[in-house]
Amino acid sequence: MEKKRERYDVVIIGGGAGGLTAGIYCGRARLKTIIIEKALVGGLATYTNEIENYPGFPEGATGLGLMELFHKQAKKFGVEFKLTDVKAVRLDGEIKEVETFRVIYEARAVIVASGGKPRLTGAKNEENYLYDKGISFCATCDAAANTDKTVMVVGSGDAAIEEGMFLTRFASKVIVSVMHEEGVMDCNEIAKAEALQNPKMEFIWNTVVDSFEGEGRLDTVVLRDVKKDELLPVKVDTCFLFIGYLPNTELFKGMLEMNRAGYLITNERMETNLPGVYAVGDVRDKFLKQVATAVGDGAIAGYGAEKYISESETYERQILNHGAPSLVYLWNAVDEGCRALLPVIESAEEALAGQAAVTRVDIYKSDGIARRLGVQEVPAVVYIRDNQIQQVLSGDITLDKIKAMVK
């Protein structure tokens, strides 16, 4: 059975903090926008019991409550939501396709906000205590809630040890389960030395998690000594897992550039290697993965998608001019030299009336069209015919030189 097709300006894959923020920006720009989320709108943040470092909430907020506000705001601006799984994507054309079980969504721009998932231990009963029931993946989020408590950190890489040391500012004791021999850790040597000297940190070597136990909420982590094959129950208030993170990027392999760990690579504009495709939040290669940084990513991508669509329409309609001769003046409104050439461009428009259409493109706020034309410095005049760039004039721009381009 042929799938139904629906057309949107923007399709956002993933409804976490980054995707919701991008949706707010796109919706407010009056773009027809849909967010496709396979699980719970709000993403991993909804599982965080308390968020105290998001600006504007001095008393803190629950992750679920904060994401409900994001959701409500996106809907206010007309963003549509579809709770389903994305099965396939085709992103390399002018019109991108996002395929679900029943529908193929077509769009001019796609924002990937598919997030990721923490790597789990695979120990018994683990699924019963995830997120707000005793197993955490974010020390920054949950450290304050563990003030004067005993916590466990599983892992010995840089993230595990650095987050463990951060937890010592709050917890009375931080127990670290390390699968290696005593003194052997996966973190850098500086972090290792500091951790071993920290009086609040206790290390249990040669151990992995065998099971998680507790009535309703985690209260015991049962470790297994891999050398002695003995079980060691450890009473804790919270267990933090720092054994890796898996980005949800399987759909995009072979299409979007990613690093060895599978995170999508973007520039500061959240642009991927494909035009009109953006990535935001935990799915991209970035320094800090937090709600606040995902919001920033989403704002940039939402703004970028709106500019991309607007510039695409201008490019096709005015710049290419349906294959007819076209002159494009690329300039910056705040540059005095660019402004001084405006009378020359006006004279060229009069002199070449009927021979070439003249379009002025101010790159002050967005240089998207200039980048499509391969122009890095302005002022510049680009001559296009038969949808192909024939010549680029920069530097000493005169009326005679412009007229000579069209001959």
Image (tube, grey):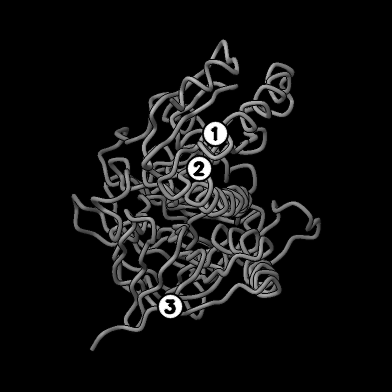
Of helix, strand and loop, which one carries label 3?
Answer: strand
Q: Residues within 10 Å of mark 3 (few under 14, many from 20)?
A: few
Give the numbered dot on residue 117: none
Q: Quadrant of residue 46?
A: bottom right
Image location (x, y in percent) of residue 88: 29, 68
| 3 or 1: tag closer to the N-terminus | 3
Q: Which residue is mark 3?
A: 6
Q: Residue 149, relative to residue 323: is it above or below?
A: below
- CA gap, disc 1 to disc 2? 7 Å
In the rendered image, the quadrant that contains the C terminus is top left
Q: Nearer the viewer, residue 91 or 55?
A: 91
- In the image, residue 134 above or below residue 137: below
Q: Which callout, 2 or 3, points to the residue nearer the camera?
A: 2
Asked if marks 1 and 2 touch (Cβ < 8 Å), the reply is yes
* Marks 3/1: CA–CA distance: 34 Å
Pair 3/1: label in front: 1
Classify 366 as above or below 47.
above
Q: Secondary structure at mark 2?
A: helix
Task: Please report whichever mark, 2 or 3, sits nearer to the chain's N-terminal start.
Answer: 3
What residue type is disc 3 on? Answer: Glu
* Spot occupied by residue 285 in the image (x, y as percentages of width and height): 42, 42
Q: Which residue is mark 1?
A: 328
**Residue 319 - label:** 2
SS at mark 1? strand
Earlier residue among tags 1 and 2: 2
Crowding at label 2, few (<14), some or many (≥20) Cα neighbours within 10 Å? Answer: many
Q: Where, quadrant-wise, is the N terminus in this rendering?
A: bottom left
Q: Write down the quadrant of residue 18 in the picture.
A: bottom right
Q: Percent position (x, y) of residue 157? A: 37, 39
